[in-house]
Image (tube, grey):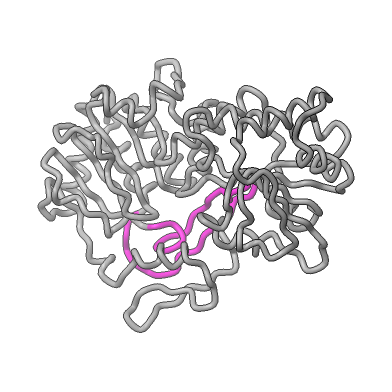
Amino acid sequence: MLCDDIALAPSADQRLAAPRTACPRLEQSLAHFGPNDANQKPAIDGQITDADSALSQAAAILSNARRPLFGGLATDVAGARALYELAAQCGAILDHLHGDTLADSNRALQDRGSFFTTLSEVRSRADLIVVFACEPSRRYPRFFERIESAGRDASVLFVGCDIDKAANTRAEAILPNADPFDTLALWSALVEGGRPIPAAELVALTERIKAAKYTAFIYEPSTLPTQHAALAIEALQRIVKAINRTARAGTLALTGDDGAATVNQTVTWLSGFPLRTRVAYGMPLDHDAHRYRTETLLRRGEIDALLWVSSFAPEPLPASLDENVPAIILAHPAMTVAARKGPTVFIPVATPGIDSGGHLFRVDTSVVAQLIAARDYALPTVASIASRLAQARRPS
């Protein structure tokens, strides 16, 4: 959510803390950072080395690869831009740590379009907030706090789920145990087709939406049924589209974690396609959300090198990665890779907003937040490493 009211300060043991912000997710994230981060060194096959040697070995791996995967991709705008340039040189496939959720949202957007809203609009305009099949505070603890407005009288109605205890405003719940697809099908029949439905709660809710000044629909793609989440998102967007014929409404998807929205936006600017695209200079772009899924590629043995980027947290390598596939890891200093048997290059990198400045897209995908470094640790950024690798591979 990129909350902009957080003030970080070193604690007594030189760890980072946010004493005036109550957020368990923030607390868990800050626990990964410690005073020894600046002392972490690059490594080749588990052996400490210098930066130049690590970069040289990483460049050699990419030069020998014919079908590399750039995965994880937990980085900022500058990191995504530099990685795209490197990927285009290598003919690499690009996918994110949260690629499955992104692919579902991208597919719904490509097929039907979307009515988006923002945190600011929800806070300032919405007098009715409809939360569909999710518990926002589970992964976004400050969500309700960030959409509250002192002068606004808003109602919150949960559809297909129980009331989130973090909702401080007037809250109700309907159909908490209903199947989300059944709910969407009935609701769509009413709103789109004007047909009578055997769900009085949905009929009453639709009337409330018609009477509201502005309705914000909140959903979390990662909590929807995994097999057909794209269809659920598409159905919800169709309902909102039909509502907008006579009333005002928008949707806010709670997603985009770990730079997912940022990298997806950046890759789309640069290529015209979202993530799960193979890019290569001199060749047509190839986008396939199913074939270029990280887990599918690894399970089928379809890649010969992995560049793993995880700058926000020490996210482990995919468990299905073959030990014999060379891996280049640009990751949080706390990342542990010593146990891996295959060819491995590890380079600790800066975390945007902690060790370096940067820019990230907020959860509502239309606001770019500028980040300022909270400490002065001399860790290289993902962008600088990717640029050096691209330079090392470029013919002289």
Q: Is residue 125 left or right of residue 391?
A: right
Residue 356: where, in percent of width, then height?
A: 42, 60
| In the image, residue 334 lies in the stretch drawn in magenta | no
Q: Is residue 97 left or right of residue 40?
A: right
In front here: 189 or 298? 189
| In the image, residue 369 lies in the stretch drawn in magenta | yes
Which residue corresponds to the image point at 27% horizontal and 31% vertical from the top-left? 396
In front here: 244 or 179? 179
**Residue 95, image quadrant:** top left
**Residue 221, image quadrant:** top right
Is residue 365 among what the camera can see?
Answer: no
Q: Main secondary structure of the magenta part?
A: loop
Q: What's drawn in magenta, residue-wise?
A: 351-380
Q: Quadrant of the N terminus?
A: bottom right
Q: Residue furthest front?
A: 198
* Figure label count: 0
Q: Is residue 267 left or right of residue 375?
A: right
Residue 327: where, in percent of width, then height?
A: 22, 38
Q: Residue furthest bottom?
A: 12
Is residue 57 among what the camera can see?
Answer: yes
Residue 328: where, in percent of width, then height?
A: 24, 41
In front here: 315 or 65? 315
Which residue corresponds to the image point at 71% horizontal and 63% vertical from the top-left? 148
Q: Is residue 250 left or right of residue 88?
A: right
Q: Give above or below for 164 relative to 304.
A: below
Which residue corresponds to the image point at 22% horizontal and 61% vertical from the top-left? 40
Q: Give above or below for 193 relative to 146.
A: above
